[in-house]
Image (cartoon, rainbow, N blue to C red):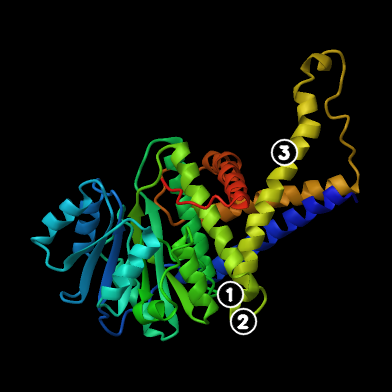
């Protein structure tokens, strides 16, 4: 077979292989998907809320945190005003008058990671709950997370992030996307491989975060980096699928691209930082997490390049030769149905079938309004294809050394 055919075969093989692993893990553990351990003690918790120009959402976030169902006197809320130039600090100070568990830490603008590190210095809780200033945890979310910390090796627990409505194409399919991401993360939890503790709501063991030096201010995705740092030290990370938090997502394609550029840049930074852990260590971090994430980055990009190559060299010739079709030209005459093409076609069809099954399983337990096959196809072929735009832009910026904070 030609080299290019082998590349197709390898791509489809790995795609089917990983989807089979996820589906098998799901079918084996689906009865316990929503289970979580009841805590044996009431841990003291410090909520850390980094905020930069969040006057539109900070009040709603504070109300959500105040209303979280947790024993009185066992939680504090620290808002870190990261040099906001709007009314964020003013709104927080007004709120503090009636809620004495809320504290405000004012500082010059230096980024989210640095803001969290400053708050960690004054936090009194045994646990740190990091919450984005535009995210709203459900009242019962914390109780469904803290029980995991009864295990001494657990360093962090993350939640299931869902989106807040939205009518635009990009908002509706982000809702779908977040459901898939959360489901996939919970499946990885069954094998101890949760590799992201998300920003909207994650809880950390305070002494361990301090022990590893806090969050990395140089990394654009501090939530990924801190997770990998803890895993590299032999600690465990978990996910509570029952603990829900709702977050605001980009409403326009341009905002979405900027956000995903940051995600991709931060992911690439993290892979580079922990590259020496490939196939090393005493847990699955070095043997699965790093290789899985790196391979996902690589194969997705190569797959799209191959599609573009095929479309340019083959399909475009047919699309732009319509006048010749009426003269008897066969647009499929270039296709030679040999063993190589047949094998690639069969693997491609297998990949497509497994993808449909995979996404059906992922959204089965969600409250999405649309779960039909048409929605699945649009998500698979249109929305997922958009991933390549921020990926290519992030790769270009990484090569240029243009690593700045891109966000929504």
Q: Residue 308: percent from the left, percent from the top?
A: 72, 38
Cα–Cα gap, marks 1 and 3: 34 Å
Residue that carries the numbered disc 2 in the rendered image: 281
Q: What element carries label 3?
A: helix
Cα–Cα gap, marks 1 and 2: 7 Å
Q: Do the residues labelled 1 and 3 touch (CB within 8 Å)?
A: no
Residue that carries the numbered disc 1 in the rendered image: 285
The C terminus lies in which quarter of the figure?
top left
Q: Residue at the spot x=8%, y=60% of the render?
A: 97
The image shows residue 172, relative to residue 139, as above or below, that is: above
Q: What element carries label 2?
A: loop
Q: Residue 172 carries which label?
A: none
Quadrant of the rendered image containing residue 307: top right
Q: Residue 212: percent from the left, percent from the top?
A: 45, 78
Q: Is mark 1 on a helix, strand or loop?
A: helix
Is 177 displayed left or right of 298 in the figure? left
Cα–Cα gap, marks 3 and 2: 39 Å
Is 13 displayed left or right of 145 in the figure? right
- Is 266 or 202 nearer to us in this picture? 266
Q: Residue at the spot x=58%, y=68% of the render?
A: 273
Quadrant of the rendered image containing residue 272: bottom right
- Is 72 or 221 nearer to us in this picture? 221
Q: How crowded is mark 3: few (under 14 residues within 10 Å), some or many (20 or more)?
A: few
The image shows residue 275, relative to residue 110, as above or below, that is: below
Residue that carries the numbered disc 3 in the rendered image: 308
Q: How many labels does the image show?
A: 3
Q: How crowded is mark 2: few (under 14 residues within 10 Å), some or many (20 or more)?
A: some
Q: How crowded is mark 1: few (under 14 residues within 10 Å), some or many (20 or more)?
A: many
Q: Residue at the spot x=50%, y=54% of the render?
A: 263
- Is 12 or 266 nearer to us in this picture? 266
Q: Are marks 1 and 2 in contact (CB under 8 Å)?
A: yes
């Amino acid at each position: 077979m030609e080299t290019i055919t082998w590349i197709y075969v390898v791509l489809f093989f790995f795609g089917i292989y990983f989807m089979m692993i996820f589906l098998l893990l799901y079918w084996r553990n689906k009865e316990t998907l929503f289970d979580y351990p009841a805590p044996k003690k009431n841990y003291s918790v410090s909520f850390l809320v980094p905020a930069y120009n969040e006057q539109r959402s900070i009040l709603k976030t504070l109300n959500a945190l105040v209303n979280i169902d947790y024993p009185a006197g066992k939680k504090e809320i620290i808002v870190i005003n990261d040099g906001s130039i709007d009314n964020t600090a003013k709104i927080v100070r007004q709120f503090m008058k009636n809620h004495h568990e809320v504290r405000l830490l004012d500082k010059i603008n230096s980024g989210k990671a640095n803001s969290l590190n400053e708050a960690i210095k004054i936090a009194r809780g045994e646990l740190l709950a990091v919450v984005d200033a535009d995210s709203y945890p459900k009242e019962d979310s914390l109780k469904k997370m803290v029980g995991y910390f009864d295990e001494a090796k657990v360093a962090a627990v993350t939640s299931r992030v869902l989106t807040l409505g939205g009518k635009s194409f990009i908002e509706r399919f982000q809702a779908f996307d977040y459901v898939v991401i959360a489901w996939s993360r919970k499946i990885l939890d069954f094998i101890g491989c949760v590799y992201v503790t998300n920003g909207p709501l994650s809880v950390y063991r305070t002494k361990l975060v301090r022990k590893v030096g806090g969050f990395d201010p140089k990394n654009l995705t501090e939530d990924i980096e801190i997770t990998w740092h803890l895993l590299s030290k032999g600690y465990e990370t978990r996910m509570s699928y029952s603990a829900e938090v709702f977050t605001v997502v980009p409403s326009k394609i341009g905002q979405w691209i900027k956000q995903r550029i940051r995600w991709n840049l931060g992911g690439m930074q993290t892979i580079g930082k922990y590259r020496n852990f490939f196939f090393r260590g005493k847990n699955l971090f070095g043997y699965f997490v790093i290789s899985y994430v790196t391979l996902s980055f690589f194969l997705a990009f190569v797959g799209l390049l191959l599609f573009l190559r095929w479309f340019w060299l083959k399909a475009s010739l047919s699309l732009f030769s319509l006048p010749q079709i009426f003269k008897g030209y066969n647009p499929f005459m270039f296709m030679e149905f040999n063993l190589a093409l047949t094998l690639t076609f069969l693997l491609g069809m297998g990949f497509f079938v497994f993808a449909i099954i995979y996404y059906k399983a992922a959204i089965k337990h969600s409250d999405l309004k649309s779960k039909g096959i048409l929605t699945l196809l649009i998500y698979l072929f249109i929305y997922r294809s958009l991933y390549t735009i921020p990926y290519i832009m992030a790769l270009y910026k990484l090569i240029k050394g243009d690593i700045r904070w891109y966000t929504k």
